[in-house]
């Protein structure tokens, strides 16, 4: 019997490898502090070998969202590519251990290893990320089984994978399979620069194949190249039924057609802001999957984001459902 899912995600399957490092180490290794840099395979292997006391966790933006939503009790699956190497086997097992169906078998490919992001945490809490995209960016329609996409209530796509034509095709096919079966499909915009590179295709996908868009202010504004958020929200709402814009401490703005809702947040000082957007999406999509109105969805997202920025690491560490109950949301 075919399994049905509340939420299926497609994204980069990236192992986050975290290590403590002082400024002297960063200088010696030529690592630019506090930013994310894309690196090549040989550089990735050099940095990986130089890391002391490595802590490895499964990462990737949409994968983090899927894990967060699964922790709240949704039936979830994740579609992403890993190599059949040590890190790839670790990733697949770690996702499965959290209750997420990891759909794809690791790929036997001697040339392109599993994607990883080497994250160096300085004594002042700054994170310097060095990401090798590896095998995950080769995702294509072959990796996206219709038995999964056609049995999803919600399909969530990661904008980063839009950089490759095969990824674009896979997205369109996945979204159409989900919608044909009565589900809804949406995207995490992920990166304003990705939008800049593929604006026409991005807008066409949103207009013709998607039901919702989730992004931050910079990402939503990049869609129509405007510095005015109100204009960006109106224009995006003109092509997509539901637009969700996170605005850090300024809350969340949601457009459903011409109806706008603004949901405030409790401002807190983050210990580590990594994963805030991913976990906001987890809470919001949990609300959608369980039939809540958009304002409740946003408040659920805010609870998840607040939890994840209270500690280091991009995934929840406590029972977030209990936090939602405490706020009267469950």
Image: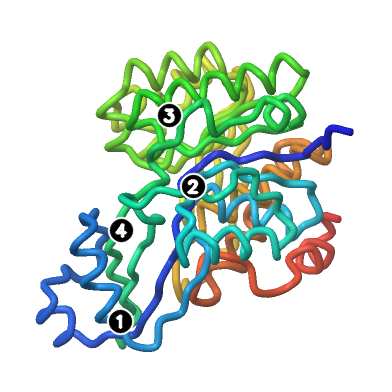
Q: Is residue 251 left or right of residue 42?
A: right
Q: Is residue 224 visible?
A: yes
Dot 4: what SS? strand
Mark 2 and mark 1: Cα distance apart in space: 26 Å
Up the image or down, 161 lies above or below 142; here it is below
Of 1 and 101, which appears nearest the observer?
1
Mark 1 and mark 3: Cα distance apart in space: 32 Å
Q: Which residue is mark 2?
A: 107
Of 328 and 80, which appears nearest the observer?
80
Of 94 and 214, which appears nearest the observer?
94
Dot 2: what SS? loop
What label sits on residue 314 in the rendered view?
none
What is the x, y in percent for residue 268? 52, 70
Mark 4 and mark 2: Cα distance apart in space: 20 Å
Tell me, yes or no, whether the two marked residues, 4 and 2, touch with CB atoms within 8 Å.
no
Q: Earlier in the sequence, mark 4 or mark 2?
A: 2
Mark 3 neighbour class, 10 Å CA radius: few under 14, some 14 to 19, many 20 or more: many
Q: Earlier in the sequence, mark 2 or mark 3?
A: 2
Mark 4 and mark 3: Cα distance apart in space: 19 Å
Q: Residue at x 39, y 88 (%)?
A: 53
Q: Is residue 259 visible?
A: no
Indicate the quadrant containing the N terminus: top left, top right, bottom left or bottom right.
top right
What label sits on residue 131 in the rendered view?
4
Q: Earlier in the sequence, mark 1 or mark 3?
A: 1
In front: mark 2 or mark 1? 2
Q: Which residue is mark 1?
A: 51
């Amino acid at each position: 019997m075919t399994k049905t899912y509340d939420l299926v995600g497609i994204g980069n399957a990236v192992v986050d490898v975290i290590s403590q490092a002082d400024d002297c180490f960063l200088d010696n290794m030529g690592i630019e502090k506090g930013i994310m840099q894309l690196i090549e395979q040989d550089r990735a292997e050099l940095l990986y070998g130089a890391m002391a006391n490595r802590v490895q966790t499964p990462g990737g933006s949409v994968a983090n969202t899927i894990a967060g939503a699964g922790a709240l009790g949704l039936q979830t699956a994740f579609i992403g590519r890993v190599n059949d190497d040590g890190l790839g086997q670790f990733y697949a097992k770690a996702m499965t251990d959290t209750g997420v169906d990891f759909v794809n078998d690791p790929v036997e490919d001697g040339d392109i290893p599993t994607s990883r992001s080497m994250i160096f945490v300085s004594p002042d809490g700054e994170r310097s990320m060095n990401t090798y995209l590896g095998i995950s960016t080769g995702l294509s329609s072959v990796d996206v089984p219709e038995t999964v996409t056609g049995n999803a209530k919600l399909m969530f796509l990661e904008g980063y994978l839009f950089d490759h034509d095969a990824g674009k095709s896979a997205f369109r096919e996945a979204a159409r399979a989900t919608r044909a079966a009565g589900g809804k499909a949406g995207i995490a915009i992920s990166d304003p620069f990705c939008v800049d590179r593929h604006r026409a295709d991005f807008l066409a996908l949103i207009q013709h194949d998607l039901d919702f868009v989730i992004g931050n202010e910079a990402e939503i504004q990049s869609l129509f190249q405007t510095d005015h958020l109100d204009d960006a929200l109106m224009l995006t709402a003109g092509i997509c039924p539901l637009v969700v814009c996170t605005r850090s401490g300024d809350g969340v703005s949601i457009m459903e057609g011409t109806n706008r809702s603004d949901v405030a947040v409790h401002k807190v000082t983050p210990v580590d802001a990594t994963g805030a957007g991913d976990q906001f999406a987890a809470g919001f999509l949990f609300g959608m999957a369980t039939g809540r109105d958009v304002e409740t969805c946003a408040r659920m997202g805010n609870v998840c984001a607040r939890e994840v920025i209270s500690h280091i690491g991009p995934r929840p560490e406590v029972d977030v459902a209990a936090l939602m109950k405490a706020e009267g949301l469950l």
